Amino acid sequence: MNYIIKNGTVVNEGTLEQRDIFIHEGKIVEDGTALKSPQLFDASGCYVLPGIIDTHVHFRDPGFPDKADFATESRAALAGGVTSVIDMPNTDPQTTSLQTLEAKEQIAERKSAVNYGFMLGATNDNIHDLLDLPVERYAAIKLFLGSSTGNMLVNNPKALDLLFKESKKLIVAHCESEDIIQANLRNYKMEFAGTDKETAELHPKIRNTEACFVSTYKAVERARRYGTRLHVAHVSTATELSLFSNYELEQKNITAEVTPNHLWFDDRDYAALGNLIKCNPAIKSNDDRIGLWGGLVDGLIDTIATDHAPHTWESKQKRYFDAPGGIPSIQHSLQMMLEGFFSPAATERDDHTEVLQEWLPLLVTKMCHNPALIFGIHGRGFLRPGYMADITIVEPGETPVTKERLLYKCGWSPLEGQTFHTRIKQVFLNGMPAGQSTAMPLKFDK
């Protein structure tokens, strides 16, 4: 099938340009002169982006069908303009071997509405096995330096040295100091457990700045010592930014990710939202939130990914110490990142056009281009001839977040009641409009 996306403003590789996109047999082509009977899609007044690549999701499949599965969460992703995801290994069974990876691939092949890839998880005992696997089979090695959902903490120094010294694959690290967290947890439980002060406002005090900085420092030091490719997941503090460089991406071995949640919420929101915004690492202060936005601008942060992590509504209603950490967010992640530039206050600014020309290419770099480059995703992430036609078309307009519109299996979002001022008008996946397309496994460079 052939398509022409006409009259849109294409945001790609640092520019905004009014031009058409031509699609032939699933791929973008240079021009449309040879296309036979193409179907036309009018994108007048819209912004045409590469499909969003979310390199950090927990779709909970297999093992946690009460929370989520690949069918529900991938459809929520597609509704939010996300065309490719990389799923985390802390499922049941954990994805720590080629056998469990293949089982997960079969699940995604049956269920997924978006393109998919997977990380393999490191443990204290499987490093030798991971190092023997072909690197093109998976996206990265996920390393938990702080315990989170699941039990995959790696705290054996010999295992860590072996992994950082020998890995030929990107390591993606969850950096929080387990020792600091556990000491804080014991102290706060002794003082507040069972009282009216046992609330989610304790979360950034337990999983605090020190816990993040100490762990990230150690991971970055190891990576520099061994020349390892390291990607630090969900940076949550302004303090950690001092550990990264703002070199051009091709000059970096060490890169960093931030989530929309850490850019949207801060510790003032715990009073109203409580456990609904409890996540690991914790959402912290407004100064941290502002600092993270600055890190995006100056190149210290390289990618935006959701860490989409659904839990049941019932589990989130437990007392703070018993409630799990994680936020479902993939259905609105792009709109969260766009809201500051399409809200009524933003559009009324005299320099609105100039701001869009600066910020839209930046967001596309962080949500499309850099994820593809850092993870070695072949043929996606850019609107280039020869690349797969994964395309997200956004238009100004209101999108209210209501429970009835949510596609997550868990059925809730901390964003309920919010109205975004952009709409996802159309998504093309592998060259076909969403709903007519078939998802594919991502291909990773060797």
Image (spheres, rainbow, N blue to C red):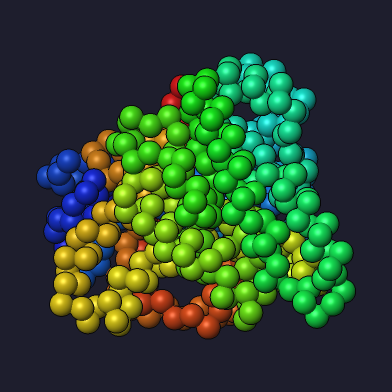
Compared with 275, 143 (above or below) is above
The tally of labels here is 0
Closer-to-camera residue (302/333): 302
Work out whether residue 51 can be spotted: no
Which residue appears at 34% of the width and 41% of the height?
246
Residue 367, x across and y down, in percent: 39, 51
Residue 35, x across and y down, in percent: 19, 45
Q: Quadrant of residue 312?
A: bottom right
Closer-to-camera residue (8/270): 270
Q: Quadrant of residue 317?
A: bottom right
Closer-to-camera residue (134/354): 354
Which residue appears at 66% of the width and 26% of the height?
160
Residue 45, x across and y down, in percent: 21, 70
Work out whether residue 235 can be spotted: yes
Residue 274, x across and y down, in percent: 67, 74
Could you tell whether 326 is left or right of 319 in the image? Answer: left
Which residue appears at 43% of the width and 57% of the height?
292
Could you tell whether 341 is left or right of 265 in the image? Answer: left
Compared with 354, 420 (above or below) is below
